[in-house]
Image (tube, grey):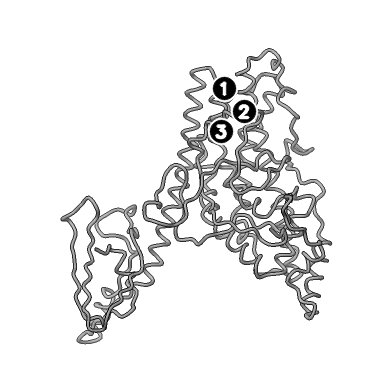
Amino acid sequence: MDPTKPSLSSKAPYVNNGGGNEALMEDASGPWRDAVDGEREADSRDPDVDVITAGVNHRGSANKHKFNTTGYQRQTKQKVVTDFSTVSKGTSAGAKPRATLSKVFNQGVSEKNPEEKGQLDGLKQALGAFAVPVDLKWRWKEESQGTTLEKNWTDIVHSHSTMSKMQRHQQEALWEFVHTELTYINKLIIIKDVVIAALFNLQQYGFLPEVTPKLLFSNLCSVLSAHQLLWQEVIYPMLQEVRRTGKPFDPLVLEAGCLQFPERFFSYQHYCWEEENNLEFTRRQMESNPHFHTFVQWVETHPKCERMRLGDMQAKPHQRITKYPLLLKAVLKNTQDPHVQHTLRGMLSGVNTFLESINDYLKRKDEELALSISAQRVEGYEVEGINEDIDKHVQKFCQFDLTCPIRGVGPQAVRKLLLEDNLKIRGRRDNKVSAQFGDDIPGMEGLGTDITVVCPWEAFGDMELSDLAKYGII
C-alpha cells in the first residue's frame, strides 16, 4: 500500500463496555492493555492507545441490526474511514517503496499551476513558523513543575517487597489506572496545543477556512476538561496519599469518581455521536484538499505529536472511555477482601451503565435522524376548501409530520422507522399489479389494518415505493 495515500476502512466507531473480554485481561502481563481494532502497530510510548472493540457488522439483513452490550452500530451513516494515515509507521517486506517527502508534500499540485504551488509554499512556511510549546505536559497549581509520575508504583509503596502475588497484581492494576489517565490527558493536550492551535494559526493567514476544530475533533476540549477535573479531584489525592504515607493504593478512593461518570463525562455523548461525522469530513478533505493533506502531513510527522496519526487522535476519547471497565475488572480480579470486591462490582456496574447510556443515546439519535430523513420524503396532500377561512383551518391537517409528538402518550414515546426498502415493479403494460400493505407487527397478528391496492401497471411504472414499504410489504 502506498504510504502517501489514505488507508480506508469500513469499520465505524462505537462504544464498547468491554463485556466478555475478561480472558484477554487475564492473559495480559504487566500493564493490562487491549488491542485496538485496525491499528497497525502499538505506540510503545502511549499505553493508553489501546482498547478492546468488537467487530462491526456491515449493513445487511434486518437480523444484523441488533443492539447489545457490545456497542451500538449506527445505521444511517455511510461507511467511514478510521485510518487514513499518510505516513506509515512501518513497512513490510512486500510494501511499495515510500515516496520522497518532497513528492508527498507536492502531491496533487500541478507544475503548470504556479498560483496553487505558491499557496502551498505559503502554507508550508506558515506551518514552519508556528511556535509549538516546548513543554506540553499538563500543569496546574498543585503541580507547578509539571505533572510527572514515578517510573513504577514500587517507588512509592514501601511494603511492595512483602506483598503476595495477588496484592502486587492489584497494585499494578491500580497503577495502570493512574498512569494511563495521565497519559491520556497529556495526549489530549498535544491535540489541543499543537494540532488545533496550528490550525487556528493557519486560518489567520487565510488557509483552511473551511476546516474548523469542531469538524475534526467535535467537543474534545470539553472531554479534556472533564478528565482534568477527575484527576484533580479523585486520582491525584489518592496518588498524593500514597506518596505521603507509603501505604498501598486503596481502590475504594476511586468509588466516588466512578459512580459520578454520568455527571462528569456527559460530554462523551456528543463526541461519540459526532465522531463518524468527523472521520467522514476528514476523509473527504484528505481526498480533495491538498492544503489539508499538507497540514495532516505536518501534524503526523511533528516530533511533539509523538507519532500519533490524525485518525488515532480522533479515536482516543472513545478508546479511553471504553477502557475503564477493563481496568476495574483487573483490580477486582486481584482483590481478596469481600467488602472491597462488593464495592468494586458496584463501581464496575456504574461505569457499564454509563456506557450503555451512551449506546442508548446514539441509538435514539440515529432513530431520530432516520425518521427525519423519511419525513422529508413524505409529502402532504392538498384539499380544496370552500373559501380562504376554511383553507386556513384545513391546511394544517394536510401535512403529515412524522416527527411531531404522539398524542396520548408521554414525550419518551417516539415514532421509529422499523423497515424501509425500495420496491420496483416490472411487468407488461396490460398487466394489473396487486400489492398489499399492512401495519401488522410480528407476534401481534390480528391487531393491524391491511390495505390492498389493485390498479393498472401504468399507475406504478418504475416508481420506488420506499415511503410505503416502511409499513411492511406482504
Residue at image point 55% right, 34% down: 326
Q: Nearer the viewer, residue 43 or 145?
A: 43
Q: Which residue is mark 1?
A: 334
Earlier residue among tags 1 and 2: 2
User: Residue lying farthest left?
Assistant: 446
Relative height, residue 414 to residue 140 (above, below): below
* Residue drawn at point x = 19 percent, y = 75 percent: 454
Quadrant occupied by the N terminus: bottom right
In this view, the mark in front (3 or 2):
3
Q: Position of residue 435 (x, y in %)?
A: 23, 70
The quadrant of the rendering that contains the C terminus is: bottom left
Q: Are marks 3 and 1 in contact (CB under 8 Å)?
A: no
Judge left or right: residue 32 versus residue 116: left
Residue found at x 39% / y 49%? 66
Q: Residue furthest front?
A: 94
For label 2, count other residues whose C-alpha is less than 10 Å away and answer few (under 14), some (14-19) or many (20+).
many
Residue at 70%, 68% (x, y): give it.
208
Disc 1 to disc 2: CB gap under 8 Å: yes
Q: Identify the disc placed on residue 24.
A: 3
Q: Residue furthest bottom?
A: 387
What whole-number distance in Å separates the C-alpha atoms at marks 3 and 2?
14 Å
Amino acid type, residue under disc 1 in the picture: Asn
Disc 3 residue type (three-letter):
Leu
Sequence order check, earlier mark of 3 and 2: 3
Question: Could you tell me the amino acid type at mark 2?
Answer: Ala
Q: Please state the horizontal and vertical placement of residue 419, each as a whole percent of the image.
A: 33, 60
Please tell me the numbered disc located at residue 173.
2
